[in-house]
Amino acid sequence: MGRLVDLISFWYNQYILHTALYMLEPWERKLFNSLLIAFIAMASYTTYLFLPGHLNMWRNFFDTYVFGSPPAATISMHDTGTA
């Protein structure tokens, strides 16, 4: 357990040094970290929400225009709806 704490402490210190956060006051560091976490959370949520639809759109594009097979479900604009 102590080794895990040492490893996390090492990663945190590397993060502080690489981003030059060691020069900031504690309240500025907390504000920066809070904004960074909020940005990462929003980017992750947006990716989770929109990526599947975009991947499906690209799959349909490649299936239709690159590989030549029609999409699985097509809607005809001239369908009258009568049987």
Image (cartoon, rainbow, N blue to C red):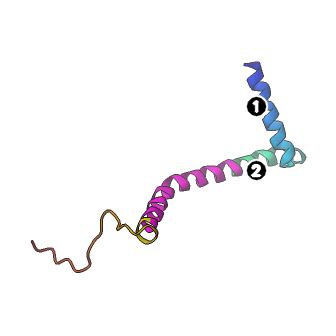
Most foreground residue, 77 or 49: 77
The residue under the point 83% across, 49% down is 19
Q: Residue furthest top?
A: 1
Quadrant of image for the C terminus? bottom left
Question: Magenta includes 29?
Answer: no
Q: Residues within 10 Å of mark 2 (few under 14, many from 20)?
A: some
On screen, residue 14 versus residue 49, left or right, reads right
Q: Residues within 10 Å of mark 1 (few under 14, many from 20)?
A: few
Horizontal and vertical percent position of residue 72: 32, 62
Q: Secondary structure at mark 2?
A: helix
Q: Quadrant of residue 9?
A: top right
Q: Which residues are magenta?
A: 36-62
Q: Secondary structure at mark 1?
A: helix
- Work out whether 47 lies above or below 10: below
Q: Quadrant of residue 4?
A: top right
Q: Nearer the viewer's eye, disc 1 or disc 2?
A: 1
- Work out whether 6 lies above or below 27: above
The residue at which mark 2 appears reads as: 32
Question: Magenta includes 44?
Answer: yes
The residue under the point 37% across, 66% down is 69
Task: Tell me whether the residue at label 1 lies in contact with that at label 2, contact meaning CB atoms closer than 8 angstroms.
Answer: no
Which amino acid type corresponds to the residue marked 2 in the rendered image?
Phe
Horizontal and vertical percent position of residue 25: 86, 46
Distance of label 1 from label 2 (alpha carbons): 19 Å
Horizontal and vertical percent position of residue 15: 80, 42
Most foreground residue, 74 or 63: 63
The residue at which mark 1 appears reads as: 8
Among numbered discs 1 and 2, the one appearing first in the sequence? 1
Horizontal and vertical percent position of residue 43: 60, 54
The residue under the point 47% across, 56% down is 52
Quadrant of image for the N terminus? top right
Secondary structure mainly formed by the magenta segment: helix
